[in-house]
Image: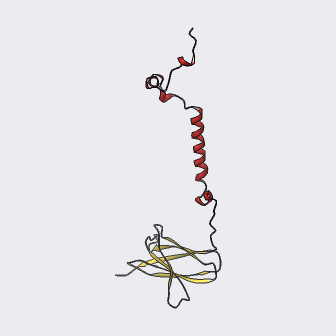
Amino acid sequence: MRKRTKNSLPALRSSAARKAWGWRNAPLPARQIATLCLGILALAFLRDFPAAAQTGKQKSVPPHAVVAGTVFRDPGLAQAGAAVTLSLKDDAKGKKLQTAASDTRGEFAFRVPPGPATYVVRAALKGFRPTQQEIEITGEEQVNATLLLVPESK
């Protein structure tokens, strides 16, 4: 029986040896497997944290209230693309504080100061009569509005 030495082992780095030994089927060295596992764990760990946590700085959100809601059209379907405006009720000029368009589900949202105030939410869209609803805010809360757009008569 022939004694094996270091020099008699196949040199797997040469192309002929790879083809003969089946290099694609060879197991990965332990170091490469460990590096791969650590990389996957690092990605999984970092994926769960927001960007602010990675930098060590967290933004503080000032206190606020939310005026949110949904715009529907007459048969009861959500209406996308409606122009929604928010203004103060007691403002003589009727100045628009914020504007938004309803999304594909007809939803919209506005951030407002948390103090007591009454707002008017208006929705308008070409081919429909405009509608409005009064919303009263008393503190840090979310108040929902439901606006129904009725088609204009021809």
Q: Name the residue rendered at 56%, 82% in the picture.
A: 119
Q: Residue furthest right?
A: 139
Using the image, determine if residue 21 lies above or below residue 30: above
Q: Residue furthest bottom?
A: 92
Using the image, determine if residue 8 lies above or below residue 139: above
In terms of image quadrants, where is residue 2? Answer: top right
Q: How many marks?
A: 0
Q: Name the residue rendered at 51%, 20% in the picture.
A: 10
Using the image, determine if residue 4 lies above or below residue 35: above
Q: Name the residue rendered at 54%, 30% in the picture.
A: 27
Give 76 or 99, whichever is nearer the viewer: 99
In terms of image quadrants, where is residue 61? Answer: bottom right
Quadrant of the rendering where the C terminus is positioned: bottom left
In terms of image quadrants, where is residue 124? Answer: bottom left
Quadrant of the rendering where the N terminus is positioned: top right
Instruction: Specify how the rendered protein is coloured.
Output: secondary structure
Is 112 placed left or right of 103 in the picture? right
**Residue 89 x/y as whole percent:** 55, 86
**Residue 43 x/y as whole percent:** 57, 48
**Residue 54 x/y as whole percent:** 61, 56
Q: Residue furthest top?
A: 1
**Residue 3 x/y as whole percent:** 58, 12
Is 48 placed left or right of 150 in the picture? right
Q: Residue furthest left?
A: 154
Give 154 or 85, whichever is nearer the viewer: 85
